[in-house]
Image: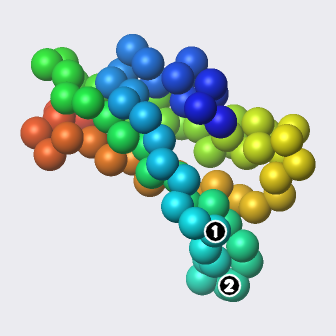
Amino acid sequence: MEKVLRDRLSSDGFAGAEIRLPDRDFDGDPILVVDVNYRFLDRPISSKVTFSLTTEIRKALMALGESRFPQVRHRFNEQQKIAR
C-alpha cells in the first residue's frame, strides 16, 4: 500500500500514511482506516490525484490476502490550497 501511495502522490506532497487499528463501517463490516498525510506545498494540489486511489489501494491489499475495505482519509495541511 505504501508503494501505491508513494507512486501516486509523491509529487503532490505525500508525507506518509498511518493505518489505524481495524475498525467497522456503518454496516458493521470490517474496514481499514488509512490516514494519508501530506506536507504543505506552495502550489495547489489537484483533487484529481485522489481519484481511484481507494481502488488501487484495495487491489494492492487484496494481492496480499487482505479483504477489509480501505477507508482513505486525506490529511492536508490546513493552509494547503486544493485545485478543482
Examine the image and state in which quarter residue 60 appears.
top right
Q: Residue at x 63, y 77 (%)?
A: 24
* Mark seen at residue 27: 2
In the image shown, does 20 or 7 lie closer to the viewer?
A: 20
Q: What residue is drawn where x is 39% and y is 47%?
A: 74
Is residue 14 shown left or right of residue 82?
right
- Give coordinates of residue 25: x percent, y percent: 62, 76
Tell me which residue sits at (62%, 25%) in the image. Answer: 3
Q: Is 62 situated left or right of 21 in this image?
A: right
- The x and y percentages for residue 49 are 46, 28
Query: Could you tell me which quadrant the N terminus lies in?
Result: top right
Residue bearing mark 1: 22
Q: Which kind of residue does numbered mark 2 sit on? A: Asp
Q: Position of residue 80 (x, y in %)?
A: 17, 35
Question: Who's the residue at 52% across and 23% down the image?
Answer: 6
Residue 30 against residue 43 in the figure, above or below: below
Q: CA distance from mark 2 to mark 1?
A: 14 Å
**Numbered-mark total:** 2
Task: In the rendered view, tell whether residue 62 sits above or below residue 4.
Answer: below
Between 79 and 23, which is closer to the camera in this rendering? 23
> Which quadrant holds residue 32?
bottom right
Q: Earlier in the sequence, mark 2 or mark 1?
A: 1
